[in-house]
Amino acid sequence: MAASLFRHWRCTTSLYSQISRRHAYIVLLPQVPDDTAETNPILQYSSNPRFNHITTDHCVNAIGKLVIDYECSLAKMTEKLKVADGNIKTAQTSFSDIFDPLDALSAPIDHAWTVVKLMYLIQHNEEMSKAYISLHSRLQKARELNADKKLLNEAQRRVINKYLLESRLKGIEFTASQQDHFTFLLSKLADEKKMFSEKVGESTRRFFHVIDDWDIVKDFPESVLKKMVRDSSKPKKGPWRVTLEPEVYKNFMIYCPVRELRWNVWFASVTRSSGLSDSLLNTSLNIEKIRQHRLDEARLLGFENYAQMSMETKMAGSVKNVMTMIATLLKHTKPALEQQLMELQEFAVSKGFDGKLSEWDIPYWRNRYKQEVLGLNEADLRQYFPLSKVLSGLFILCKSLFGITIKDAKSKVKLWDEKVTYYEVFNKTDGKQLGSFYMDLFQRPPNKLAIPAWIESLPGFKTNPVVFLLFNIALPAPGEQPLLSLNEVDLIFQKFGHCLQYLLSTVPNAEVSGLTNVEWDVVDVCPRVLSNILMTAATLKLVSGKVKEDIPLPDSLIENILQARNHLSALDLTRDLYFSSLDLHMYSSTGFWLDVTRRVWSEFMPFPLDDQDSHPSSMECLWCTDAPASTYTSTWAKMIAADVFSAFEEAASNQSSESLAEVGARFRDTYLSLGGGCHPSEVFRRFRGRDPSPDALLKNYHLKD
């Protein structure tokens, strides 16, 4: 049966919005720029970009030219597909008739747009920012396609279903009046989200607390102190200004020894935009309007509520399935949570604490426990993780588990900075090149955006895929080698999980290869699997080597690292479950948001909710994200990843390298290969031979034997 496909996606100028590939572009330029591949390096899409030659004009002209070329070619292609009556062919039209030419048309502009995005990230100046936002706002997507689904393979059906779903969620079947109402709802929703963000931003900026006493901040990380002083070159010279900026707030709660100060900053955080200090910054009405607009949007599209609509793009499939997962996990966390909090209470009392631990006490005493009982100190741990040792260990691991060889090829390409590295990836068995990747690891203010980590890829159409990994690791002092924290090592492993999905994809359709079209709640499965693999004794030894001595982490320290990972694991999981449930209830029920908060809190959290605590009033992740009712996706991905990782654990228990290699090969052939071309439930079954279970996650958290 032929399927008529169409999608029309309203563009946003936000850098962090997801940019879907394979689309028609409409550009508002008076004429076609006369740039060629010889004069504009962005147009040389058959080779790696020469970043050191790219200018802002190159970006603007390349996109302008390619967009117009694309539109003209698309129009010609459409004419060829038409029959005498002017309609698009149906039964006579195959998948290849439509998507193969579209892939060929899209490859140059996809390549160019990825380069422009990357330039925005690594060369973040005013000129480039204006050009990027201008180009981004020009893009609109529209297609009309046909194919006989009976003749399609699995990946091709996923492409068709993707377009059908996007079309439905964008209201393609609406009447003119319904479309007008739909557009009105989206406009009002955007207004409320913008107003909410502005109020939260102003509330956040208004709070500060000045500290003059060095003894209070002496244990703070230097990177945080730099954010708290006027002169960042003198972090130990006060006064120090405490704000609600995320990194400052998080570390203040961990390292501040004065309980009254911790309460003050915590209280300021959970009452932001509640109207407590300024009624004009109260977001309560904005929250209710956002919820109502999204409910109206969902019902207009034929759904009972927004949470139900959200499940259309998720592996979970239904709110009921998610709530079942939450209830199952919560059943096991509650008994363990009581025991873990009691142990922390006893430790705090033994160190002179008087009273019962509250929310604002937990981060501080948790850190004290890790340092004093488990003997973990970040500065000491860094000595075991030189960057070169971490990367060599990661590459060795990929060779043994996934059958790939990674070689330094920096001399083959032009780079945008001397510290950027470039690698080529080959199949271990036959030496075939599979792709390549760049690594831009270090901070480079003010040009490079201060994002912890970012990944981009150039689509591999008739060429091997190219991936860009960007991090923001602090540069070492001159003459010293970079030393990583364990969190930074973990972040590199996680992002490399995404990198492998792009490099090792075997799906020929760009619409569903790599991470494209992967359901939201499993996007982070591969990163989580790599993170779990890192946190094993064997891998920690492989990637560690003490500076100057090259001695791996001792067994006693590894044991403490693994214990620290699960310290208060029940509280961490309970908190995740609370926010997951809160998010779903906000978009599946109609009660007043604060009443919903109080009800859900009482079901999950072990601490009483302060009468003035209105933490959702400042949570942009609940109200301003492009993917509401999706907070649970992180826990769902952890659950799937833990179950996947358990297969590696089972193989390792056999003490057989062949068993591990077999599991690694199966992981490559499923999770690293199939991308969005296969439904994640089927991907899991092919890897594990059954449906997923939460048992492995509970075992990972030491909440179940």
Image (tube, grey):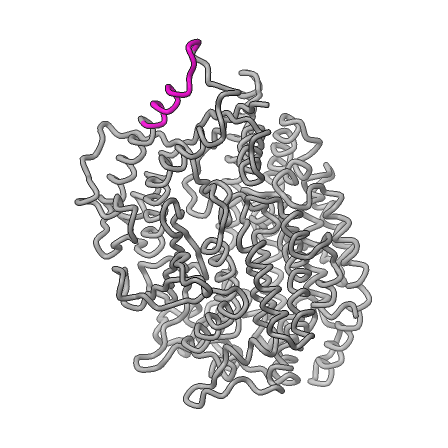
- Most extreme residue toward the top is 85
Residue 72: percent from the left, percent from the top? Answer: 31, 26
Residue at 54% of width from left, 67% of height from top?
401
Please identify the quadrant where the N terminus is shown. Answer: top right
Q: Quadrant of residue 568?
A: bottom right
Location of residue 191 with respect to 484 vertically, above or below: above
Location of residue 29 with respect to 597 vertically, above or below: above
Residue at 35% of width from left, 52% of height from top?
118
Residue 73 visible in the shown view = yes
Residue 47: percent from the left, percent from the top? Answer: 29, 51
Q: Quadrant of residue 70?
A: top left
Nearer-the-camera pick, 64 or 499: 499
Residue 404: percent from the left, percent from the top? Answer: 46, 64
- Most extreme residue toward the front is 430
Range covered by the magenta-colored residues: 73-85
Residue 685: percent from the left, percent from the top? Answer: 68, 52
Q: Residue 82 in magenta?
A: yes
Residue 208 visible in the shown view = no
Q: Residue 63 in magenta?
A: no
Q: Quadrant of residue 647?
A: bottom right
Residue 348 left/right relative to 671: right
Q: Main secondary structure of the magenta part?
A: helix
Q: Count the marks: how many?
A: 0
Residue at 54% of width from left, 55% of height from top?
672
Residue 98 left/right relative to 684: left
